[in-house]
Image (tube, rainbow, N blue to C red):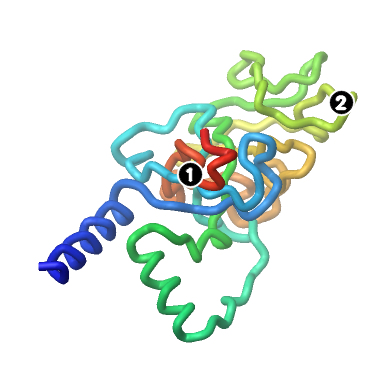
Amino acid sequence: DLLVIFVVAVLVSFLIKTFLIRSFFIPSQSMEMTLIEDDRIIVNQLVPDVVPLERGDVIVFRDPGGWLLPTADPQLPPIQAAAEWFLALVGLAAPDSNDHLIKRLIGLPGDHVECCNAVGQMSVNGVPLDEPYVALPPGDTRVSRDDFDVVIPEGSLWVMGDNRYNSKDSRYNTTTPGKGYVPIDDVVGRAFVISWPMANWS
């Protein structure tokens, strides 16, 4: 009976991880102070296939190509590697987090996104954004160091980190094959809770 319960629990966890939610960790400082490096987050994988994307969502997506530097897989002892594989299978570990990025969704297909106006704000379709989540250097009021003016192509997104002066986001990937845009097909889901450490739970 215990073996049957264990197998069923693993199968249910695998299905949940595959289709509903999964865990990732934050690999960099680009989303501070919303998300801190090494935070563990839970991602809703029903977005965007079932639940539509919305501006302001914090999304996890696969590298569209050229955003991340190549990294070698760490060589783990066999027992540790097996444990990591099992935890990843049931969604309790995220060994592929370094192959993904997490940013805030700013522009949807067709949106006109530009920065910055006279008071340092970014605007979408002519409407200035109130962005209380943005981390800026002391004394700086511009939400982007560099100006930009883009119209988002069909099937693509414009994303930015909350730590605006320390985030290699859509603004700084315009020389990659995707020209800084993130294909909607590369979106894994929307982050909705910080699960660890408990002191950062929200």
Front residue of 177 and 72: 72
Q: Residue furthest left?
A: 1
Where residue 165 sits: x, y (%)? Answer: 79, 39
Disc 2 element = loop
Q: Is residue 100 above or below residue 7?
A: above
User: Pointer 2: residues within 10 angstroms few (<14), some, or many (20+)?
Assistant: few
User: Pointer 1: residues within 10 angstroms few (<14), some, or many (20+)?
Assistant: some
Q: Residue furthest bottom?
A: 78
Front residue of 41 and 196: 196
Disc 1 or 2, which lies upstream in sequence?
Answer: 2
Where residue 120 sits: x, y (%)? Answer: 79, 20
Q: Is residue 167 above or below residue 111?
A: below
The type of residue carrying mark 1 is Ser
Residue under circle 1?
A: 195
Where residue 195 sits: x, y (%)? Answer: 48, 44
* Residue at point 43%, 49% (across, down): 188
Contact check, label 1 and label 2, Cβ < 8 Å: no
Residue under circle 2?
A: 140
- Residue 51 lies left or right of residue 12; in this view the side is right
- Residue 183 lies left or right of residue 168; in this view the side is left
Q: Residue furthest right?
A: 139
Front residue of 47 and 173: 47
Where residue 146 sits: x, y (%)? Answer: 81, 35
The type of residue carrying mark 2 is Asp
Q: How many marks?
A: 2
The nearer-to-camera label among 1 and 2 is 1
* Residue at point 57%, 82% (across, down): 75
Q: Residue furthest front?
A: 2
* Residue at point 61%, 76% (across, down): 72
- Label 1 and label 2: CA atoms lie apart by 32 Å
* Residue at point 72%, 38% (across, down): 163
